[in-house]
Amino acid sequence: MYTTAGMKESKLIIGTVLVGVLSLIVLQYEKTQKRRFICDGSLWEKYEHDEFEGFNNETGVLTDNYIVPNYVHFLRMGSKMKKIKFIDAVVMLAAFKKQRPDKIFVHTDLETFTGDYWKYLLNDVPGFRDVIVLVKTELPKSIFNQTFSKDYHFYHSSDVLRINILLKYGGIFLDNDSFMVKSLDPFRRFEMALGWDDGEFLGTQVLVAHRRARFLRLWLDSYKDHYYPDLWYFNAGEWPTVSILWARPELVHRVRLLFGVHDLRNELFTTRWKDWRDQFSIHLLTRHLKFLMKSCDIDYKDENDLTESFVKKYHNTFRDMISEIYEFNPSINVNEVKNIVCKE
């Protein structure tokens, strides 16, 4: 039987426990509210580089707000890029229609672009002219006093330039042949998101990043004393994966398969792949289609052959993707729309 003193002591213990529990609940509530308050602001202006330490790139921010600005970046350097071809136009059009960005920045050393498809984008796509911004840019010649490779200069300097673009602006960087299937807004809640498939190195074709993302600075710094001019993808993909992300994968939100940085050429060009809409984006690999097309008895030399009439001629996934955002010119007549049959 409890004595009066024992009952008082028990009540005191219970009361102490309750107070402790309530204190923890209040403390957790305050932390949550503080985080929600921060996330409700313009985080790309508030976050400093080191403030991301401890940020959860699995969940991202917990509100409906974004920490990555709604910018899309393309890079077009050199006189060969002056004319906007059909494929260039539909990639830009997909980014515009699917993402509805505040700005599309085209970083270029050219004053302007030419071609009927450039005129189409500017004059026939409502709202496109309002968001397009040409940013005068030069390809860097070196990185940390290491001169870029003569053979791979364009590719290696472009790899560095995309990092610097995101460090300056933040936003979404797309390769010129990365086709956006649906909005990348879900990934704008993370410090940085990129395609990184199992058993592979990171992909640079689709990058979503806050301008103060920790990995961006580390990625750039990884070139110090480690630039290898004769290796095509080492510095852009292999070395930063091994030297940084293997040790600290929490620095990025890892997107497996859905950014389409893996090889989907067969699915795109030789069949009608019903699952393409599950992707957020797809790297088209337009510079690497020659042997695939040859196996399908299709006369194809390089990406310049991917004209509107060529695409319109074949029943495949790629045509279906384009048809969703672009109405083919009815004046382009093809004698026969073909199903593609390829050799094993």
Image (tube, rainbow, N blue to C red):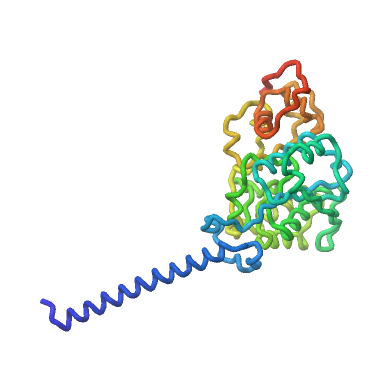
In the figure, residue 136 lies in which quadrant?
bottom right
Counting labels gives: 0
What percent of the width, then of the height, locates residue 163? 73, 56
Q: Is residue 115 visible?
A: yes
In the figure, residue 295 lies in which quadrant?
top right
Q: Is residue 266 visible?
A: no
Extreme residue in the left direction: 1
Left or right of residue 114, residue 264 in this image: left
What percent of the width, then of the height, locates residue 330? 75, 23
Residue at 62% across, 27% down: 272
Residue at 33% across, 75% down: 19
What percent of the width, then of the height, locates residue 294? 76, 25
Q: Quadrant where the N terminus lies?
A: bottom left
Above or below 254: residue 180: above
Above or below 331: residue 47: below
Residue at 86% across, 46% down: 112
Left or right of residue 112, residue 323 in this image: left
What percent of the width, then of the height, locates residue 135? 81, 53
Left or right of residue 314, residue 144 in this image: right
Q: Quadrant where the C terminus lies?
A: top right
Decide which of 246, 290 is in the foreground and name it. 290
Decide which of 227, 292 is in the foreground and name it. 292
Extreme residue in the bottom direction: 5
Above or below 193: residue 84: above
Decide which of 252, 174 is in the foreground and name it. 174
